[in-house]
Image (spheres, rainbow, N blue to C red):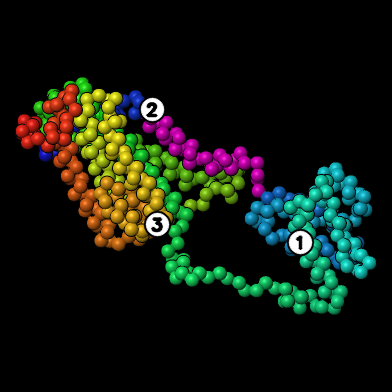
């Protein structure tokens, strides 16, 4: 192989793609879509009508002398910081009819009338506009029941400190019988799952899209008969290697700005929301520190090896047809294999140590998708990762050699559909050299 000729072919493929108006427009549109998608949580938070917990004003008309408003407030405060509506109690000296009028006019959300019955027990009447048992009235009822119990014990001569000690909640914890879950060290977190989803989708979409570019580029050259001219200046292997590298570089030229713009905007979601005076409580809180150097490194290894492997196979399949309309049919077997690896990667996220996951993470055609999921959510043995990379590299070399053979056979049999017998025929192969 002549690396100088490979470089020239790769540069031609890369530059011809970048000069296409469709490539430029597609790149800009994809970057805009990614930026908008990264800003989507901020946009949703900005249009969300729920700006956080609302405050309900409740007037307390206490004729019992039991300091009900003061003793009831602690029972209503819990949960306010988690988004539960805040109930603000206001001690009022209004008459019951005046308090009802304020509730009816909307000046207050409710009124709590406190009296004592014939047995000197506290009696509560809650007034609201609907007369129904709402969430506010339910919370006040629960708090009123506790205040009434305190009052009864106080009336019975039981000290408040004794009451608090008697009613203090017990120490209560939950333990699992499984040692793996008891320590919590093997638990798969949401951040790891999100990263595995992201890397799997990016790898699948990039290989599928740019691999299809390779197949279409081969057919385009065959249909215009440019390949016959090019093959006189370079060997089929040089042309194939240059095409794969050039289209791969063009794909990365489109992919990297898109990922970089999306990552920067996603990381700046909270500063953007604060600048626009939008509540940041509903925004996702992902720990970008979970993206370790090792994970990124393994992703790049499997992405590059997987892309070159599939690009060579796409080129081989593309060389078997002579019209653009036949490309999708030619690459359909490859798409089926890719979908197996794609969906297996999602299964692996939740069962990284299962036998199926381990086998598919070593099998070369599925390992680029499955092994990266195991690396992120699990802890695969070093020997399995080394075996996976080794088999992938060996398969890649074999795929390039087979693809180069099919590539040059496809030139000789222009206008025909080469059979497997023709592809592996020694006489035809000698002629193609």
The x and y percentages for residue 38 are 48, 41
Query: What is the spatial separation of the Cα atoms under label 3 and label 2, in whole angstroms?
Result: 41 Å
Instruction: Classify residue 402 by image quadrant.
Output: top left
Furthest residue in direction top, as rendered: 224
Task: Answer above or below: position of 409 versus 338.
Answer: above
Which residue corresponds to the image point at 39% horizontal and 41% vertical from the top-left?
A: 259
- Please identify the quadrant where the C terminus is shown: top left
Of the pair 91 and 424, the residue shown nearer to us: 424
Q: How many marks?
A: 3
Screen quadrant of the N terminus: top left
Q: Which residue is mark 2?
A: 25
**Compared with residue 429, is residue 350 higher up or lower down, i.e. above or below?**
below
Q: Quadrant of residue 171?
A: bottom right
Q: Please indicate, yes or no, whether residue 213 appears anywhere in the rendered image.
A: no
Q: What secondary structure do most residues of the magenta stretch adopt?
A: helix
Query: What residue span does the magenta drawing correspond to?
Result: 24-52
Front position among marks 1 and 2: 1
Is the residue marked by circle 2 packed among few (<14), some (14-19), or many (20+) residues within 10 Å? Answer: few
Say which of 99 and 150 sits in front: 150
Quick check: is 33 in the magenta stretch?
yes
- In the displayed structure, 174 sits above or below 15; it is below
Residue at the spot x=70%, y=52% of the render?
A: 85
Point 68% across, 50% down: residue:
53
Q: Which residue is mark 1?
A: 142
């Amino acid at each position: 192989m002549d690396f100088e000729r490979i470089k020239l072919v790769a540069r031609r493929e890369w530059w011809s793609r970048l000069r296409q108006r469709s490539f430029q427009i597609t790149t800009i549109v994809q970057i805009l879509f990614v930026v908008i998608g990264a800003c989507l949580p901020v946009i949703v938070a900005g249009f969300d009508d729920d700006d956080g917990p609302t405050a309900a004003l409740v007037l307390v008309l206490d004729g019992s002398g039991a300091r009900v408003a003061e003793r009831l407030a602690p029972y209503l405060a819990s949960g306010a910081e988690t988004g539960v509506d805040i109930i603000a109690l206001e001690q009022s000296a209004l008459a019951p009819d005046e308090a009802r009028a304020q509730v009816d006019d909307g000046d207050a959300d409710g009124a709590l009338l406190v009296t004592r019955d014939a047995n000197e027990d506290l009696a509560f009447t809650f007034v609201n506009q609907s007369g129904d048992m709402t969430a506010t009235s339910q919370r006040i009822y629960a708090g009123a029941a506790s205040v009434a119990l305190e009052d009864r014990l106080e009336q019975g001569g039981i000290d408040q400190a004794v009451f608090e000690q008697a009613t203090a909640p017990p120490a209560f914890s939950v333990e699992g019988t499984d040692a793996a879950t008891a320590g919590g060290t093997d638990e798969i977190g949401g951040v790891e799952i999100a990263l595995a989803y992201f890397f799997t989708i990016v790898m699948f979409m990039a290989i599928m899209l740019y691999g299809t570019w390779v197949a279409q580029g081969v057919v385009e050259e065959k249909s215009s008969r440019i390949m016959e001219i090019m093959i006189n200046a370079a060997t089929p292997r040089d042309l194939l290697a240059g095409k794969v590298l050039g289209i791969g570089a063009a794909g990365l030229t489109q992919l990297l700005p898109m990922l970089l713009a999306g990552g920067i905007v996603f990381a700046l979601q909270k500063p953007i929301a604060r600048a626009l005076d939008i509540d940041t409580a509903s925004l996702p809180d992902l720990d970008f520190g979970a993206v370790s150097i090792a994970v990124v490194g393994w992703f790049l290894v499997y992405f590059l090896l997987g892309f070159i492997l599939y690009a060579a196979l796409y080129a081989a399949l593309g060389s078997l047809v002579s019209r653009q309309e036949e490309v999708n049919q030619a690459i359909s077997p490859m798409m089926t294999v890719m979908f197996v690896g794609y969906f297996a990667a999602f299964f692996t996220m939740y069962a990284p140590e299962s036998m199926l996951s381990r086998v598919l993470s070593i099998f070369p055609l599925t390992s680029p998708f499955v092994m990266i999921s195991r690396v992120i959510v699990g802890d695969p043995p070093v020997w399995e990762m080394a075996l996976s990379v080794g088999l992938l590299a060996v398969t890649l070399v074999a795929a390039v050699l087979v693809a180069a053979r099919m590539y040059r056979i496809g030139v000789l049999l222009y206008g025909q559909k080469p059979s497997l017998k023709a592809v592996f025929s020694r006489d035809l192969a000698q002629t193609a050299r």
